[in-house]
Amino acid sequence: MPCLAAVCQLNGHRVSRHPWRALALALLLLLSAPVRAQGVEVLELVAVRDEQAIRVDYQLRVTLPPAVEEAALRGVPLHFEAQATLWNPRWYWRDERIARVERGWRLSYQPLTTNWRVSQGGLGQSFPSLSEALGAMTRSAGWRIADPRDAEADGRHYIDFTWRLDTSQLPRPLQIGLGGIGGAGEWALGIERTLKLGP
């Protein structure tokens, strides 16, 4: 078979005489295989100040790690949260927190309809695919953080932005399981960014 011949011989030499070549070939095959990206990718994240408000616009691309997606498919609701905090830097003391806003979502899978449901507060919406459901939680235009008069127009202020999977709201047995060695790796899903607020 051609593929076996390629493995057994490389540049006219038997692989058994050059074991590192077999390892290099195996690594090449692994690296060329399609890999599913996991985590959070920032597509857009800006702090905007105008006459009406200080706000944040963001758009993220989120891919659930296999363990997280499998748990959701088995009926475990997932909770996500976004938080933005406006700070006034001070050289003589801790930075002053001017405003903090939060929003949260609950993502659940509906096996009877094979839909994904996103709930926020008392409102909910169903989506036919996981990617569409994640899209509803990972973008916002004009998220109001504070009143423009709350921060001086000197360009010193900044905003801390976070978006994450809130593992504290997982069922208790699953939280205990995440406490094991390496257990929380796939569940540590989120980002933290600091944005400069211009004048």
Image (spheres, rainbow, N blue to C red):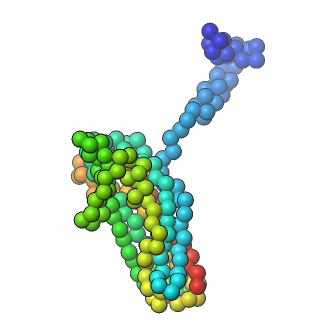
**Residue at left 33%, top 64%?**
104
**Residue at left 26%, top 43%?**
113
**Residue 174 x/y as whole percent:** 27, 48
Q: Among all residues in the image, which is located at the extreme right? A: 12
Q: Quadrant of residue 10?
A: top right
Q: Is residue 185 visible?
A: no
Could you tell me which quadrant the N terminus lies in? top right
**Residue at left 63%, top 15%?**
3
Q: Is residue 6 above or below residue 131?
A: above
**Residue 198 x/y as whole percent:** 58, 81
Lateral position of residue 168 relative to residue 27, left or right: left
Q: Quadrant of residue 139?
A: bottom left
Q: Quadrant of residue 138?
A: bottom left
Q: Is residue 60 visible?
A: yes
**Residue 27 x/y as whole percent:** 61, 30
Lateral position of residue 5 relative to residue 133, left or right: right
Could you tell me which quadrant the C terminus lies in? bottom right
Query: Relative to the observer, which residue lies in front, 85 or 136?
Result: 136
Lateral position of residue 38 relative to residue 18, left or right: left
**Residue at left 42%, top 45%?**
65
Question: Total of numbered circles in the picture?
Answer: 0
Q: Is residue 100 above or below residue 123?
A: below
Q: Is residue 103 above or below residue 189?
A: below
**Residue 72 x/y as whole percent:** 31, 46
